[in-house]
Image: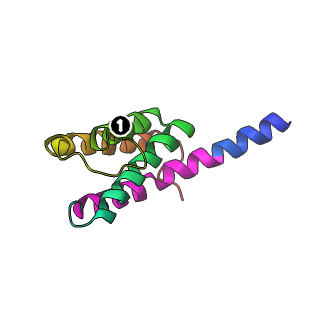
Amino acid sequence: MADDLLAAKIAVLQRAFVVQLPERIRALDDALAKLGQDEESVKAVHVIVHSLAGAGATFGCPEVSTAAREMEQAMFPSGIGHSKFDLAVHARLPALVAALKAAAERAVAEDPQSGQP
């Protein structure tokens, strides 16, 4: 009984993560559009990809997690707390972003309740 309740609560959290993925990707797009304008935009990108990497793994979206982790490691090789953007990765950025978006789209499409309010 307690296991069923826990499983139901986890399913609700997983669903909430998937439902919020498009919004998180839009926030990433917004932060990326401002990249280079100020230090806050770099921090925003870092926070978003770091949280997607962790939450994707936690909530059953390993493709999202992997794509976000690859993007984070490429852009910020010094890790969290070091939001200095590695300019050498700039040429790879479109491919990294595309991989993350594709993984997020697949996660949303695979959600059995997608398209339902």
Q: Which residues are magenta?
A: 12-34
Secondary-structure class at tag 1: helix
Q: Position of residue 82 (x, y in %)?
A: 37, 49
Residue drawn at the location 16% of the way across and 46% of the way down:
90
**Magenta stretch mostly in which secondary structure?**
helix
Picture layout, residue 20 above or below residue 63: below
Picture layout, residue 26 above or below residue 97: below
- Say whether residue 15 is magenta: yes
Picture layout, residue 6 above or below residue 48: above
In the rendered image, the residue lying farthest to the right is 1
Residue drawn at the location 35% of the way across and 37% of the way down:
67
Foreground pick, 51 / 25: 51
Asked if one can make out residue 32 in the rendered structure from this viewpoint, the answer is yes
Foreground pick, 73 / 66: 73
Q: Position of residue 17 (x, y in %)?
A: 53, 49
User: Quadrant location of residue 108?
Assistant: top left
Q: Position of residue 80 (x, y in %)?
A: 42, 46
Which residue is disc 1 drawn over?
67
Left or right position of 93 against 63? left
Picture layout, residue 69 above or below residue 49: above
Q: What colouring style does the render use?
A: rainbow
Q: Residues within 10 Å of mark 1 (few under 14, many from 20)?
A: many
Amino acid type for the residue under numbered disc 1: Ala
